[in-house]
Amino acid sequence: MRLLLTNDDGVYAPGLAALHAALAGEHEVVVVAPETEQSAVGHAITLADPIRVRRLGPRTGFDGWAITGTPADCVKLAVSELLPQAPDLVVSGINLGANVGVNLLYSGTVSAATEAAILGLPGVAYSLGTLKDPDFAYAASLAAHLVGLYPSLGVPRHVPLNVNVPALPAHKIKGIRFTRQSGARLVERFLRRSDPRGHIYYWQAGETMGTEGDLDTDYPALLAGYVTITPVRHDLTHDEILSRLGGLDLQLPSER
Ligand code: MN
């Protein structure tokens, strides 16, 4: 397959290198990744600034570009300008840290896969469930395995997949579960410090909470040792409430 690789941890991130190493043998792989870390930029795109592009030389080990944009920019620019033809699959990751529950809304990693879906291309996001001492080797080989299986899953092009891999030795991983998003969310904690000139600043240091719940949801299943795969959607409409509101007869103000 022709694969477009991107991420939100930036072009120098070890997770991207591991993913590239696992996929480049079997597939035609081009990297278009952010020049610097873009974690938690969500689905942002760059409008008020130019997007600079830098061709990646042989020294990086990648064929592709680093760009001064977001993960969503990477996919847009790759598909409309940089690649000679559309990829068969957009693969985003491997992110340093799980992307579960409410945090999908913040995730640049998932947004790259979502952007693919918006452009009518299949997309998969991969994340490793740790922030410390990551070992991407098994997650990368698993990602390559799942990329090979992707065509057989029959997932429609407008539905990206969000995959999380537990940060466990391979023999401790219990299996693969298809899950829905859990209620896990980042619980705020701000470190209040002062800079060398005495000005106060805050550094967000929240942690993802919401470990309780059933194993059909992403975070509990991940913590229990399962690889989780969640098909996601970007239409945020709440159908049930819409149909209830649709029954109301709201009028414009009488004086206009
Ligand atoms: Mn990230």
Image (cartoon, grey):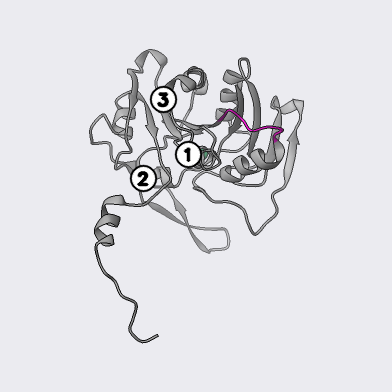
Left or right? Give the position of 114 relative to 232.
right
Looking at the image, which residue is at 57% across and 42% down?
71
Return the x and y of residue 97 as percentages of the image width and height.
45, 35
- In the foreground, 174 or 122: 122
Calculate the distance from the C-alpha at mark 3 to the C-alpha at mark 2: 20 Å
Q: Main secondary structure of the magenta part?
A: loop
Crowdedness of circle 3 by 10 Å Cα count: few (<14), some, many (20+)?
many
Q: Which region of the structure is painted magenta? A: 83-89
What quarter of the picture does the C terminus occupy? bottom left
Looking at the image, which residue is at 57% across and 44% down?
72
Return the x and y of residue 76 as percentages of the image width and height.
62, 43
**Residue furthest toward the bottom?**
255
Q: Secondary structure at mark 3?
A: loop
Mark in the foreground, 3 or 2: 2
Q: Which residue is mark 3?
A: 167
Return the x and y of residue 245 as percentages of the image width and height.
27, 61
Whether pointer 1 and pointer 2 mark residues with C-beta atoms closer than 8 Å, the reply is no
Q: Amino acid at mark 1?
A: Val
Please tell me whether residue 216 is drawn above or below residue 172 in the rendered image.
below
Q: Which residue is mark 2?
A: 102
Q: Secondary structure at mark 1?
A: helix
Crowdedness of circle 1 by 10 Å Cα count: few (<14), some, many (20+)?
many
Looking at the image, which residue is at 76% across and 25% down?
58
Q: Amino acid at mark 2?
A: Val
Q: Secondary structure at mark 2?
A: helix
Q: Earlier in the sequence, mark 1 or mark 3?
A: 1
Report the number of numbered marks.
Answer: 3
